[in-house]
Structure formats: structure tokens, C-alpha cells
Amino acid sequence: MKDAMNDMGGDKGDGMSGAKELLGRAVADVGRSTVSADAVYAKAAKVRWRRRAVMSGAALALVAAGAVSVPVLAAQDNNTTSVAAPPRLAEDKGDQAKARQLAKLLPAEVGTIERVRWDVLIKMANPKKGEPKYVGPLDGQYAISRDGGVGYLSMEIKDQKYIDGKTGGKGMADDLCAPDPQAGVRLDCVREKLPDGRVLTIWRKPVANTSGEPRWGAELTAQLTLKGGQVLLSRDITGFAGKGELGPLLKTPPLTRAQFRELLLRPELLPAEYTK
């Protein structure tokens, strides 16, 4: 063995074939070993292949993770909490323009606002499938991130056909704050008749005690009557838990009752013909 190793050290120019021959001689000198030089090289090659496979697998996993990763806005200040921004589940870039327009109507401390789609989040609908045609310029759903949680704002103008379908043709009650067993509990309900004849009603909806999904948190709900029998429906929600959730619920709805009321009376939520 000693002579064989000296021969390996003294002739570096023979390359791999020389080294293999010398190693074979060394193994033969030992006598008691049953390991061949070919087996040694085969084992080394197998180890190298395994290492490459592990590295390739890890790279593929990272690529796959990147394909479904959610964009994140993280606070850089060590004294603040990192907040994950909700994913952009609205395909049209104009939808994020709507989010920026809505942000201009709200106090800066409300949080990060992004346009989302509940049908994609909750029902796993194809995001490339178009949304229904909205009437209002800012109609839709918005995720609001702050303090590590995610709440939601939704607003949509509905016509008489929708109302008839939801009420079985009976129409909306004139006073939503009046007791109505079929409508459920409306807490802290306030009905306000505006100078132009419209009626704004805001109430607090209790948290539903259910095991189904999604499990909605506390919310403020509103209805604003418009001309022609249409209504603006809106929800100010602490969030939801379950499949598709974007983060923990907020402790309170994104907007206070006063902020919610102020938003609902903004003319920017209505089509131009409504403000004439």
C-alpha cells in the first residue's frame, strides 16, 4: 500500500486512468478488502449524482414557489410590524387604478388598499374570467391591510331587478331599522334621510356563529337609496377566515362609522348622470 501511494504522489500527469490503476493496485495489496476500484468510483459518481439531484430539486421548488408567491410590502423599520400586502387578484391594471382613486377618498391611516375579487379568493374562480359589469366607477371589492391584518371594503350599485330577485319581488323595506325577522339582526341601526331625498342606512352586523367558510368577522353594512329605484350597497368588514383568507382579521372595521358614512356620500362613487 505504501509503495502504491508513493507511486500516486510521484506521477500526477497520468490523469484519472493512472489514479484508477494505482488505486486498484492499492486495494489488491490489502488483500482482505472486497471493494474494487471500480466500485469506489461508481460510489463516488453516485454521490455526485445525488448531490446534483438534491440541488436541482431545491431549485425547482424555489421556481415553483415563486410562481405562486404573493407580492409583499414589508416595513423596513425595525420598530414596525411587517405587513403583507394582498395579492392582485384583479387582472385588469385599471382595477389597481381604482384602488388608488379610492385611497384618495380615505384617510391616510386607513392602511394599504388593493383591488381584489372575492370570487377568486373564496370560490377559486379563474382570475381571467371577467367580472360582472359594474355601474359605479369604484364598484368592487378592496382589501385593506394594516397592523398585520386584512379587512375589506365592498361597494356596488344594484338595480331594481337585483332587488326584486333578492326580496322575491317585495322590494326593500322603507325602514331597514324596523324589526324584520327575515332580514336578521341589525344592531345600532341608523336611518338618515338626506336633504336631496335619498336615504342612507348604516347598521352593525353581528358575527355569525358558524363553522362554514368563509367565516366573516364583524362589519358595518350600509344601503344608500338612489334615483330610479337603485341602491348603493356597501360593507366595511374586519375580514374573513377560511379558504382564501389573506391574513388575520382586523380588530375593527377598516373605516369607523363616521368615515364609512362620509365615503358613502362622496359623489365619486356614483356615475356622472347621478350627480347632475
Image (spheres, rainbow, N blue to C red):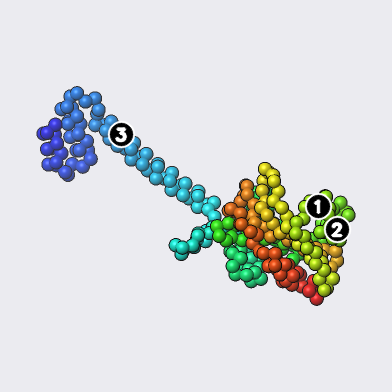
Placement of 250 over or under 210, stated as above or below? below
Image quadrant holding the N terminus, namely top left
Residue toward you, 187 or 173: 187
The quadrant in which residue 269 appears is bottom right
Residue at which label 1 appears: 183
Q: Secondary structure at mark 3?
A: helix
Position above or below: 122 against 257:
above
Residue 173: which disc? 2
Disc 2 and disc 1 in contact, CB within 8 angstroms: yes
Instruction: Locate residue 189: give its quadrant.
Output: bottom right
Q: SS class of the residue under badge 2?
A: loop
> Would you say the residues marked 1 and 3 are in contact, meaning their CB atoms lie under 8 Å apart?
no
User: In the rendered picture of this protein, how many numbered marks are placed on residues?
Assistant: 3
Res 141 seen here = no
The local crowd at label 2, few if under 14, some if 14 to 19, many if 20 or more residues have their Cα within 10 Å, is few
Mark 1: secondary structure: loop
> Which label belongs to residue 106?
none
| Residue bearing the label numbered 3 | 43
Q: Residues within 10 Å of mark 1 (few under 14, many from 20)?
A: few
Q: Nearer the viewer, residue 94 or 141?
A: 141
Disc 2 versus disc 1: distance between alpha carbons? 10 Å
Marks 3 & 2, CB-CB < 8 Å contact = no
